[in-house]
Amino acid sequence: MRDHVKAADEILDREYRVLDKGFLRLIDYMGSDERIVNSARVSYRDSKGKRDSAGLIDYLIRNEHTSPLEQVVFAFHVKAPIFVARQWMRHRTSRINEVSGRYSLMKEEFYVPCKSDIKKQSTFNKQGRSDEDVDVDVAESFLNGLDEVYKNSYQIYNDMINDDVSRELARITLPLSLYTEWYWQIDLNNLFHFVKLRASGHAQKEIREYANIILNIVELVVPLATASFRRHILGGVMLSSEEVCEIRKVLDLTKLNLSDKSLNRLKEKLSL
């Protein structure tokens, strides 16, 4: 029997606007928090279990027992600029079907960033922007240049189509800012991994906006799993062995405001 989550059913096919012309739509889902719990408990033939659902899910995520999470699956309809799509599709643990410029005429839809998002190159992160604004005249020139490039490239594309040049060749005149669309199906475990990487401050701002909205949508389907993911994965950090050694030297356990169970887990992590 298919799981039905009322809050999720209410937003099926709802369009969530992202960037200037993009969107996200949850078109289908399979499973819920209950599916995760039942999948985990079947491993030891216990349909009820002594541990409550929230506690069991938290245990699974905290200890990286991920196979029960793979029982929950989502399908999204996504519209985003091609440069976002190319970052997105590096996550190969999903199923994707994208609009094809060989079969379809591409729409004249290009991403135009807000002026406030036009920043200088970061001196620390070679692949990202800094928080420092460019000069106002530089921002204006950038936006005017984009507008000119977009109009010219689409005019060339349109002219070639009208001259009966094949669509598969005509499309190569169009820039990476062109909007594309695809269907994206992914299980919860791999979706969490996607969000962990793409909602990070190290990811490009444009794809971060999609990742954050995806997590808010997923939270409606699996609120318990999402809460544990936020707590242990998004809010957690990985430490090197050297860092752990240094923490051991200065840590005063008497000053920690943790429950006995949480304190014991910390001791185990730090080998105290």
Image: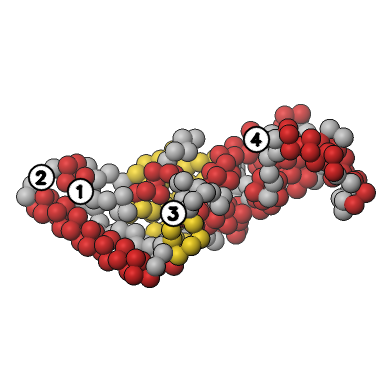
Q: Quadrant of the C terminus?
A: top right
Query: SS class of the residue under badge 4?
Result: loop
Q: Amino acid at mark 3?
A: Gln
| In this view, 27 is above or below 191 | below
Residue at the disc numbered 1:
173
Task: For marks 2 and 4, give the CA distance.
Answer: 49 Å
Q: Tell which residue pokes out farthest to the left in this image.
A: 163
Give whichever of discs 4 and 1 has the lower sequence position.
4
Residue at the disc numbered 3:
121
Query: SS class of the residue under badge 1?
Result: helix
Q: Residue 257: percent from the left, percent from the top? A: 87, 53
Q: Residue 13: percent from the left, percent from the top? A: 45, 57
Circle 1 crowding by C-alpha within 10 Å: few under 14, some 14–19, many from 20: some
Image side of residue 124 versus residue 140, left or right: right
Q: Residue at x 49, y 57 (%)?
A: 130
Give whichever of discs 1 and 2 has the lower sequence position.
2
Circle 3 crowding by C-alpha within 10 Å: few under 14, some 14–19, many from 20: some
Q: Are marks 1 and 3 in contact (CB under 8 Å)?
A: no
Could you say which disc has been placed on residue 165 in the image?
Answer: 2
From the viewer's perspective, is the residue at label 2 or at label 3 nearer?
3
Query: In front: 121, or 214?
Result: 121
Task: For marks 2 and 3, give the CA distance.
Answer: 39 Å
Q: Are marks 4 and 1 in contact (CB under 8 Å)?
A: no
Quarter-of-image position of residue 267? top right
